[in-house]
Amino acid sequence: MKLHQLRYLAAVVQNGLNITTAARKLHTSQPGVSKQLKLLEDELGFPLFERDGRNLVSVTAAGQQVVDRSLRILEEVQNIRRLSSDLKDDRSGSLAIGTTHTQARYVLPPMVQKFRAGYPDVDLHLHQGTTEQIAELAKLDRIDFAIATGGDELFPGLVMLPCYRWQRQVIVPRDHPLARERRVTLEALAKHPIVTYTFSFGGRSSLPALFESAGLKLRVALTASDADVIKTYVRLGLGVGILASMAMDPVEDADLVVLDASHLFAPHVTWIGFRRGRLLRGYMYEFMKTFAPHLTRRLVDQAVRAGAAPELARLFANIDLPTL
């Protein structure tokens, strides 16, 4: 059994059992990957995959156990490489972050600027997407950090640390009837089409559920993952916008009226997460502290040791998260 065979196995599984795609990602040939998988099966004495001719259909029960152990082995190999890099030079490397458009556009820029000033030799890679897309990137181990909002049920293999709270706001053009409202209500919102963020595909979104619980119908004109797109269509008169408070710029968005909706919508929490068992390099700790100052190295290490969600909740119970 060789390490590269386990790497090939993991790559095939992570690429939907498509050997050609896995080989391309591994910068090797499809026949070479197939041969190594067959050699591994011969050595183990049982099949790793169910096959239909030359096509892989599914992972066998025994194969899944091998896959799970292989992923842990490959993670530890990567940890050893990170440890070596850290001991040789803790100020250079790479950092891949999966996050939403709102975070990348409105929250991260000053923090990235500050981090880059201290670590100019760390290559930063931002991958933008919905929460579900970020979770998939984390599952495939394509990112070091996931920065997202919502429950942590989409990130079962990650240590998720709370960073800050934020509110949703209602935005309308200056000539809109709601612009004159002193205190917007759900009943008033229900009279107009809504332009807001793409609803979660993993379950019921809190916005439709909120209207439903009030006995009101949510009229959706358009959903988008990009806050700038939402604002564009609000300006065109397509509907009333509901978006994150930090996505509003007082100068660029001076043509829009912002209505406080903190009495309507519960606050959200933005989290930063990393794969459990991952060896964090020094600059990774520094990035977390730059993004959320309360995330000191000591607190992060305590969170890693805490493990289960109830223990994490107790650890952060006395920390007053900032509100953006």
Image (cartoon, rainbow, N blue to C red):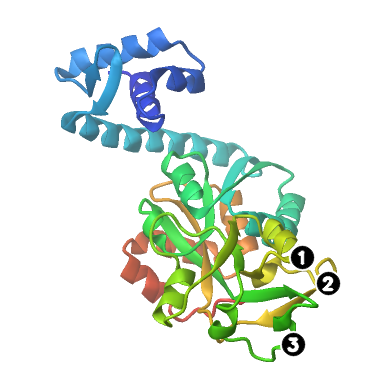
- Report the amino acid beneath label 2: Asp
Residue 9 image label: none
Instruction: Classify 10 Å Cα crowding around label 2: few (below 14), some (14-19), many (20 and above).
Output: few
- Indicate the amino acid at tag 1: Arg
Residue in the picture at 42% in, 76% down = 212
The answer to whether residue 111 shows anywhere in this view is no
The answer to whether residue 112 is left or right of residue 73 is right
Q: Which mark is residue 235?
A: 1
The circle on residue 180 is: 3
Which residue sits furthest front?
Answer: 191
Residue at 52% over, 43% down: 143
Nearer to us in this view, 246 or 44? 246
Q: Which mark is residue 255?
A: 2
Dot 1 or dot 3: first in sequence order is: 3
Q: Residue furthest bottom?
A: 182
Residue under the image location 66 percent in, 68 percent down: 239
